[in-house]
Image (cartoon, rainbow, N blue to C red):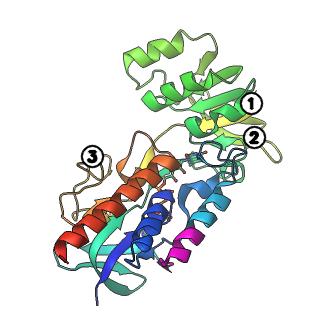
């Protein structure tokens, strides 16, 4: 028999959808992904999720959300969804060698940050290294930080970080920014920001947390060290939508195209969280759109099965 609802993804969006649909009695099946929990697993301190006045550890917050969903009756399959058939009714979802059928689908697979791709960064993510200035900027009051990137996000992050940090150094691979002129002007006229052009971070330095970076001048090959307390990477995000290509409408960056916040062009398929959100990318906004998906699932199922 087909499921009422399958939720793909187990970050704040997927788990919020699971709590709501489970409470409604729809017994949701969550295909949680092989890396269960999503991006919050990368942070030890979440200070902006309402309800936790002293902040909360990211993995702990996710664990609580999962327990809450399970307690309400959500079921979990620890696999990645690899294929979908959205032309069929019920829809079909392939995961871990099995095919599941479902009346409705919530896709909440998130968008991963693009990191630098150097070995030493793995040790420091969440320990002075971040890809979310909005989330982690306030931890760097009166500290020295660096930002990697040259687009609008890197400019926005740098300007935002000047509210807290003593100094912000932008490290950029090229000799000019890709960002809009107005953002560049704001950055270049800010006395707290300096730019190191034509350079890339080659190594992160420090014992238990970021203490500096080794930077390579890409024109001369010269190496230098910069003492910093925090490194923010702003070189993009990759939505986890490879398995959706050709099945659902994606924009040129791979984000799912939505209307009315969570609707897709296929009735009964809803989208929540960062996978459709290149703009806000916060746990609470992901939880919010995950919840909206759940409410739309209820409406859809009620209309489908009147009485
Ligand atoms: C370092 C860092 C620090 C952050 N700090 C904060 C903070 O302090 N406060 C805050 O509000 N936000 C913070 N964020 C942002 C926040 O984590 C995200 O906005 C939020 O997690 C997005 O939730 P989501 O459910 O949309 O996606 P995600 O959390 O990315 O979860 C997506 C889920 O989908 C799964 N998945 C992917 N592909 C598949 C597939 N094919 N099949 C099945 N499952 C799949 C993944 O394994 C994962 O479980 C931070 C982000 C980072 C990177």
Q: Is residue 207 visible to the viewer in this orientation of the structure?
A: yes
**Label 2, residues with CA under 10 Å away: few <14, some 14-19, many ≥20:** many
Q: Report the quarter where the C terminus lies.
A: bottom left
Depicted 48 relative to depicted 41: above or below: above
Mark nearer the N terminus (3 vs 1): 1
Q: Pointer 1: what residue?
A: 228
**Span shown in magenta:** 66-78
> Tag 1's secondary structure?
loop
Mark nearer the N terminus (2 vs 1): 2
Q: Is residue 70 magenta?
A: yes
Which corner quadrant of the image does residue 21 belong to? Answer: bottom left
Residue drawn 45% across the image and 68% down it: 18
The reply to whether the C-beta atoms of the residues labelled 3 and 2 are less than 8 Å apart is no
Query: Residue 170: horizontal and vertical position, in percent?
Result: 59, 25
Q: Is residue 244 magenta?
A: no
Residue drawn 41% across the image and 79% down it: 27
Q: Pointer 2: what residue?
A: 210
The reply to whether the C-beta atoms of the residues labelled 2 and 1 are less than 8 Å apart is yes
Residue in the foreground of this view, choosing between 23 and 78: 23
| Number of numbered labels in the structure image | 3
Q: Answer left or right for 166 relative to 175.
A: right
Query: Residue 259: horizontal and vertical position, in percent?
Result: 23, 49
Mark nearer the N terminus (3 vs 2): 2
**Label 1, residues with CA under 10 Å away: few <14, some 14-19, many ≥20:** many
Q: Pointer 3: what residue?
A: 252
Depicted 307 relative to depicted 197: above or below: below
Depicted 69 relative to depicted 142: above or below: below
> Tag 3's secondary structure?
loop
């Amino acid at each position: 028999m087909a499921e009422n609802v399958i939720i793909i993804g187990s970050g704040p969006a997927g788990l919020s959808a699971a709590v709501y649909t489970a409470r409604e009695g729809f017994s949701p099946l969550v295909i949680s992904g092989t890396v269960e929990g999503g991006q919050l697993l990368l942070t030890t301190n979440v200070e902006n999720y309402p309800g936790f006045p002293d902040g909360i550890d990211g993995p702990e917050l996710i664990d609580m959300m999962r327990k809450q969903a399970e307690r309400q009756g959500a079921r979990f399959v620890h696999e990645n969804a690899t294929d979908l058939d959205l032309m069929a009714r019920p829809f079909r979802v392939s995961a871990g060698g099995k095919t599941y059928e479902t009346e409705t689908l919530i896709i909440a697979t998130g968008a991963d940050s693009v990191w630098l791709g150097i070995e030493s960064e793995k040790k420091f993510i969440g320990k002075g290294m971040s890809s979310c200035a909005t989330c982690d900027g306030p931890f760097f009051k009166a500290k020295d930080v660096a930002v990697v990137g040259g687009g609008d996000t890197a400019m926005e992050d740098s300007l935002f970080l000047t509210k807290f940090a003593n100094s912000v150094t932008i490290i950029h691979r090229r000799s000019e920014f890709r960002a809009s002129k107005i953002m560049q002007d704001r950055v270049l006229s800010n006395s707290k920001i300096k730019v190191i052009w034509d350079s890339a971070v080659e190594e992160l330095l420090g014992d238990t947390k970021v203490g500096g970076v080794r930077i390579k001048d890409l024109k001369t090959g010269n190496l230098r060290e910069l003492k910093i307390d925090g490194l923010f990477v702003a070189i993009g995000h990759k939505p986890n939508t490879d398995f959706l290509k050709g099945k659902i409408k994606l924009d040129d960056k791979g984000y799912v195209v939505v209307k009315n916040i969570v609707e897709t062009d296929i009735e009964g398929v809803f989208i929540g969280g960062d996978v459709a959100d290149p703009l806000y990318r916060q746990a609470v906004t992901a939880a919010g759109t995950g919840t909206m998906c759940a409410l739309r699932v209820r409406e859809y199922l009620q209309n489908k099965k009147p009485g």
